Image (tube, grey):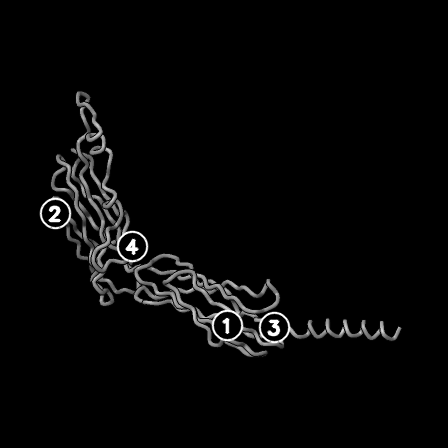
Amino acid sequence: MNMKFLKLSGVLAITAFAQSARAELKWEQTSVDLRPAFNDKQAVAHFKYENVGNTPVHFESVHASCGCTTAQTQNEQVAPGQKGEITATFNIGGRTGTQVKTVTVQTDEPDPARSTVVLTLKAAITPLLEVQPAFVYWQNGEEPKPKIIIAKANKDAAIKKLDVASSTTDFTARVDPGSAPNEFRISVRPRDTTKAVYATLTIKPDSPANTGNTFAVAARVMPPAPTSGTAITPSTKTAVSTVRPDLATPAPTAGSPRQ
């Protein structure tokens, strides 16, 4: 009886010790929302943690989701009660819009539910200039009235004017103030709509913070539709129905932001 009691006591003691000897990282937050300035080169997130257990925690691996993001730990081992952070750095480049990057952290915590943690960095990046639409066109023979392109400047960019240049003399462009602050109206007009022509309009913001970035939109006069007596060949059909895809979206130029 005494031997059985001793064995049971030993098992309970080992179980109690195993439960008391635990490692656990507690994260202050696993998702960070950032709003970098339009001219920032990087967005940096700090993910803070604390070892609330009573045994050390070791980082086994820390991997970012893409090559544009790096992650760095302060320590490879976190002692009980010790605090620290993982720093995630996202290199913005020419990216705009909402960017979501993750960092996967693997530790030696015995509980599988806590041994792998995914940290998320969200960066909302406002571009220097937003241009809509990116393509304007006229049907063959249409009255050559101006079409309007709206350009919205980043409110922190201090843009006072826009310079717009056409790749051909077939189109003219005039820039006027828009109906809202930091807004511009670009009036594009073809000189003639009786022949098919196209052009790229290059928009250059005049801003102290601009480092040579330009933005491009497209303008086109469509080719004439075939008459009833004209046989529609594959080449004719292509000429009538196809709008150059490279002119349907802003074309990157030297120094232009890239997605």
Q: Of discs 3 and 2, which sits in the foreground?
A: 3
- In primary-sequence order, the first of circles 2 and 4 is 4
SS for callout 3: loop
Check residue 23 in the rendering and tell me which mark sits there, or answer none: 3
CA distance for labels 2 and 4: 23 Å
Q: Which residue is mark 1?
A: 48
Q: Is residue 247 left or right of residue 60?
A: left
CA distance for labels 1 and 2: 56 Å
Check residue 168 in the rendering and tell me which mark sits there, or answer none: 2
Q: Of discs 2 and 4, which sits in the foreground?
A: 2
- Is there CB contact under 8 Å for labels 1 and 4? no
Mark 4, other Cα within 10 Å: few <14 / some 14–19 / many ≥20: some
SS for callout 2: loop
The spot of residue 117 in percent (x, y) is 53, 64
Q: Which residue is mark 4?
A: 130
Is residue 131 placed above or below 232 in the rendered structure? below
Query: Which amino acid type is shown beneath numbered disc 3?
Result: Ala
Position of the C terminus, as image quadrant, is bottom left
- Is there CB contact under 8 Å for labels 3 and 2? no
SS for callout 4: strand
Q: Which residue is found at the position 23% from the left and 64% from the top?
A: 210
Judged from this view, the residue extending furthest toward the right is 1
Query: Which amino acid type is shown beneath numbered disc 4?
Result: Glu
Query: Which amino acid type is shown beneath numbered disc 1?
Result: Lys
Q: Which residue is found at the position 61% from the left and 72% from the top?
A: 23
Position of the N terminus, as image quadrant, is bottom right
Check residue 154 in the rendering and tell me which mark sits there, or answer none: none
- Is there CB contact under 8 Å for labels 3 and 4? no
- In primary-sequence order, the first of circles 3 and 1 is 3
- Is there CB contact under 8 Å for labels 1 and 2? no
